[in-house]
Image (tube, coloured by chain):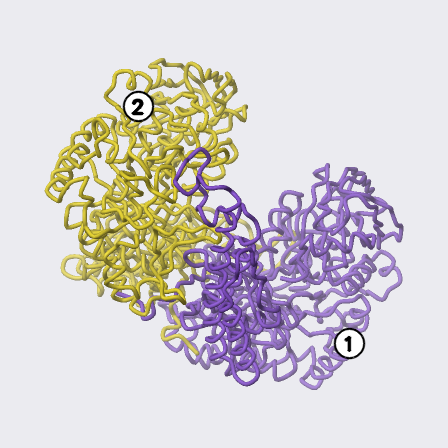
Chain colours: A purple, B yellow
Amino acid sequence: MKPNEGRSRVIIEEVSPEVDGGRYAAKRVLGDTVAVTAAIFGDGHDHLGARLLYRREDEKTWRYAPFAELGNDLWKAEFTADTLGQWRFTIQAWVDHFDTWIHDLHKRIAAQGTADAAHATNLNEPLPGTSTPTSGTSTSSTASAALSTAAADVALAFRSGAILLDKASSRATGEDAKTLKSAAGRLRVIAERAPENGVRYDFPLDDATVALAMRYPDLSFMTTYSREVPLWVDRKRAEFSSWYEFFPRSLGKNGAHGTLREVAAYLPQVAAMGFDVVYMPPIHPIGHAFRKGKNNSTVAEPGDVGSPWAIGSADGGHKAILRELGNFADFDYLVQTAQGLGIDIALDIAFQCSPDHPWVKQHPDWFSIRPDGSIQYAENPPKKYQDIYPINFESSDWQALWQELYSVFAFWVDKGVRVFRVDNPHTKALPFWEWCIAEVHKTHPEVIFLAEAFTRPHVMYSLAKGGYTQSYTYFSWRNTKAELTEYLEEITQPPVSDFFRPNLWPNTPDILPKPLQVPNPALYSQRIILAATLGASYGVYGPAFELMEHEPAKPGAEEYLNSEKYQIRQWNLDDPAVKAKSLAPIYTVLNTLRREHPALQTNSTLRFHPISNDNLLCYSKRLGDDIVLCIVNLDPDAVQTGFTTLDVLALGVDSGAPYTVEDVLTGSTYMWQGARNYVSLDPAKQPAHLFILRRQTQAKQQDSEAGVPTAR
Amino acid sequence: MKPNEGRSRVIIEEVSPEVDGGRYAAKRVLGDTVAVTAAIFGDGHDHLGARLLYRREDEKTWRYAPFAELGNDLWKAEFTADTLGQWRFTIQAWVDHFDTWIHDLHKRIAAQGTADAAHATNLNEPLPGTSTPTSGTSTSSTASAALSTAAADVALAFRSGAILLDKASSRATGEDAKTLKSAAGRLRVIAERAPENGVRYDFPLDDATVALAMRYPDLSFMTTYSREVPLWVDRKRAEFSSWYEFFPRSLGKNGAHGTLREVAAYLPQVAAMGFDVVYMPPIHPIGHAFRKGKNNSTVAEPGDVGSPWAIGSADGGHKAILRELGNFADFDYLVQTAQGLGIDIALDIAFQCSPDHPWVKQHPDWFSIRPDGSIQYAENPPKKYQDIYPINFESSDWQALWQELYSVFAFWVDKGVRVFRVDNPHTKALPFWEWCIAEVHKTHPEVIFLAEAFTRPHVMYSLAKGGYTQSYTYFSWRNTKAELTEYLEEITQPPVSDFFRPNLWPNTPDILPKPLQVPNPALYSQRIILAATLGASYGVYGPAFELMEHEPAKPGAEEYLNSEKYQIRQWNLDDPAVKAKSLAPIYTVLNTLRREHPALQTNSTLRFHPISNDNLLCYSKRLGDDIVLCIVNLDPDAVQTGFTTLDVLALGVDSGAPYTVEDVLTGSTYMWQGARNYVSLDPAKQPAHLFILRRQTQAKQQDSEAGVPTAR
């Protein structure tokens, strides 16, 4: 079947950013320069024009940005994401006959110039040694004859141009229309003057006229891209965030249960360390049925506080606060205190219930019922988790269920919460998350969702596509140079980086990686440095990390012994003796570095550089003139040395000129030059070089040529 | 907005083959085993089921094929493309609760078995050193208590299974329904028998019952993929073809213009050389206005025959035959002769007109009109091609134009033509081709279109996506090991190979590559060997190639001197002296090899193997047990030696066992072993090894494990 308009000759393909053909939104943050690229081409050699159409989804009309050709049929346009929320963009492209005419006219004008060109013009490149009646004539007369022919071609071309200018005029209005009309007239006048022998025409239009005509292209046969591509714009913290996790229950004094007020009192110290997101395990009432005892024992002793993830009791469920922590007034105070410190309070939402949760009685049909009428508890045969009832997302009452789960987020958003860490989202229906997150974002696009899904890549990526702002990663188990390089390149480059934002954690209450089961400060420092400099977002389960809590629950396990998940641990962080051995000071160094250097606030420019030692990892992040170069010794026990092979182009460094690197860990500065530089790191003294690279001024001029990305 | 069915928990992504998200059809050939892969996953750990739905587009109902999981959420299904034309496929996937239940039940049954497991089952893996009231009891009594618990769990699981079997029964009919119903009953009976202490249940269902239940999955919440993906199935010659090109005008005797009858008489020789497509330049009347003389001179001398691409005269246009060649009776005879020899006659369709073409008078509005009322001839300022009028695809009469152009193909298809070589398709509107080719294929899916587009990659690929069966390539200019490897890997692997089928030509009437401007038999042999073994489809501009016609039109040019494009060349191919120096015999060797070895009839298994010399190129193609290994000396002047590093797994060779390689060029056989083997090629003696690799029988068994592709 024929298309409606067969004269639309331009094809638009390979549009980026576009996730799964526009099925999902690509992600950017407020203020980003969004670069849209596409392959735009047509038949033949006509010149093309193209424009980007973009708008916030709630805007009625499109805004426009011009496309420029990068070569090989690839084009690029940019716009600034100046508001939060859902955006759409599409592309229009057309054959630009006026631009083609300008291009050809320049060649015709030049063709008048030389006998050679004229010769070619006249004789259509005859071949040496061929003899024809005309090519027997003398070169000079041939040339002059040729010139007049070439000039006549130019005159005719002027008349073609006049027609194009008339059309442009008819698309313009007011002064523009007049100007173009008269330009057309002038062209015709010039064309009328038949040139005498030897006369050469000059290019007849001034740049202003050409530019004006280009502003009124003929869009009659324009091609519009088939999709309005979705793009989601988050606040900057969605990309750049520093998370600190701890258990409020452990902040009490003299064995008492900690409270939200004590959390609020602790916040200034967290802020001083430079963190901007404080994440607490679930703060809801904890069930009593099958409550877990210390170290995950199936039988709780009197006074055991149970697991915060066994949610719900007679006191309420996901919209209630654990009595021991305080009340809503305390929570409001906490949120206000946090806001005053520029900190986001992150709540942990775990959609599962203790047998005592109100939903169990009110909505038994939201759970799976066993043949004996009992509700199915969580299990992975033969293991049982009888203190937990999973929700059944195939419930016939799923619509009410979805609404209630959504209302949990709405409830806490109403209480001032803007960041949620979601527990095991991969065990809840994926379509639910896509709907729920969009629902929250409708009224609160500033809300951030972190997916705690440690599962298969497709599922983790699917959660991110479905709307999760950030995701936990495999970083916790990536230790070697090869592992770190391959994995970080995968998750920080398109297509993955268009929808998936990694949040790197060296440890969590559920994960005490094997290497951290040895209390080696060099190793701990190395891991937190990697997390904070490889990832624009990172987090740490604080007290256990800075105090190098390292005993596993049992040999071979990755859980902590005497975990706060099942009992109160008072770390006495204010005790000078404790402070003395705490690694906390490095947080401050790293977070200060991250705040002062925009290069570390994005992953888009992360680049690994070769270095001649598999125990050394060398990488850089650069944003314009802000360049951070990190070299980490992955061996916590021995001195490692090597020579770098820096990608100086990527660093914008003039391969000839010297440059300085200043180590923020030691304050020492080195003068380096070119790609090859010597490095020696003694883990006993310092686990890494965190260099600020300062180029010579000449080198800076290279930026444009180097074409180093300064934004996605 | 909520989905209609929120309980559809399965996601289907990364479907392959799928060209531009299903915008265009992937290409396969008749008899192919079409492998469809996709990422299929859901939340949690439930087992999934999936099926492929496929049909010819004109079929009312879907056919089904099961998906099998490859691991990491990737699944694969296959079907055989058993008829030509347009196909569609899509995917359905669901959570399979019965399969999940079977899986869990096996674990529950095992859990009864050991005190350990029972211990875990009962005590939910308590930790060493923890003391609770119950774990104080003796191991034995703990174990027995545990066993009864584990057994009770199994009994309850049986009752769950009975419910699932009842549901499966309700979805089945007749005997199946009865069988499943009674199986459910039996499960309940077993479950009723409360086990005494120490009793262990065995797995209660036989394989037949399990298999039967699996045949009736619960599809209530099934996910169906969003698209019905198009797939085009061509005849085998679309993928595997050997083209021979020559100018009929030169087949005459004693200076006379050649005829279609003489072409017919020449066909047996072409067939004997093993070619199956004979391609002739346009056979239509040639214009007189501005007719080109010999060597592209702008002035023709009396008797000059002109360019076959300057189409149209008073005798007619694209539906007429040049008087000198003969009439339609001659053409019918030619086509029948060809069919008798298993040869396709390929016509050259060039949509452009000489000023004398009937269309010019009948439809001046199909061309561009200049301000002086004249029709715009082809030009690339300052060059002019006044013997050619390009068609204006922005004509307001475009619909009639498209129809007329289509009718040219329809006309010749009606005359028995099934292969068209299209001249410069990239200078005609791309949407036209997508429509026109589909229109021809509606009634004649067996028609093959070869795109003669030597232009930018996006445009060449777009023509292929739009329906072109085969495409000319850059092979003519790819000479070094690096160039050949990179380019061939690009065009023979997905995604490109899903829509783009390369046809490799060492030369054409328009292309005499620089290297071939030296008449070196070794080099000519090397180029034709590369074309015929790297490409399942290849072609050659015959006479000029086998006689090593090598003079360029002028220094630096890639055109032939005294080209047949502008004059008659009588090659006297039957003259013994000419025969003696002809390279034609190698065609026969290569085409015989190609016919006898299915491995060479597809590009999907092309694999390059490392060899320790940049002047040697080593590659293989394998289909099941048919293995061809080629080693070409890219240096036509010197002996080159090196050691191979063969990918023995890809070759299905047991790395330990020896295997034989037989050179079809020399007949000599070698005993090789493993990856590393010595090669020495003297271009003066032979330009390449074309080995048939024969594995030991043990090695053959490896196939399945090796997982070597035997089809796409």
In the image, which is nearer the foreground, mark 2 or mark 1? 2
Where is the N terminus of chain B found, in terms of image quarters?
A: bottom left
- What residue do we see at 25% from left, 55% from top? B357
- What residue do we see at 35% from left, 15% from top? B666
- What residue do we see at 48% from left, 16% from top? B680
Q: Nearer the viewer, residue B671 or A559?
A: B671
Does mark 1 fall on the same chain as mark 2? no
Q: Chain of mark 1?
A: A
Q: Quadrant of residue B278?
A: top left
Q: Is residue B529 above or below residue A612?
A: above
How far from the left and from the top, in percent, is residue A535?
68, 58
Q: Amino acid at mark 1?
A: Leu
Q: Nearer the viewer, residue A272 or A700?
A: A700
Q: Nearer the viewer, residue A387 or A64?
A: A64
Q: Amino acid at mark 2?
A: Ala
Q: Nearer the viewer, residue B383 or B457?
A: B383
Where is the C terminus of chain B found, in terms of image quarters?
A: top left
Q: Is residue A554 above or below residue B158?
A: above
Tag 1's secondary structure? loop
Q: Is residue B256 above or below residue B67?
A: above
How far from the left and from the top, in percent, is residue B690?
38, 22
In the visual, does B378 lie left or right of A529?
left
Residue bearing the label numbered 2: B584
Residue bearing the label numbered 1: A341
Q: Chain of mark 2?
A: B
In the visual, does B470 lie left or right of A234?
left
How far from the left and from the top, in percent, is residue B314?
21, 52
Res. B512 in view: yes
Tag 2's secondary structure? helix
How far from the left and from the top, in percent, is residue A356?
53, 76
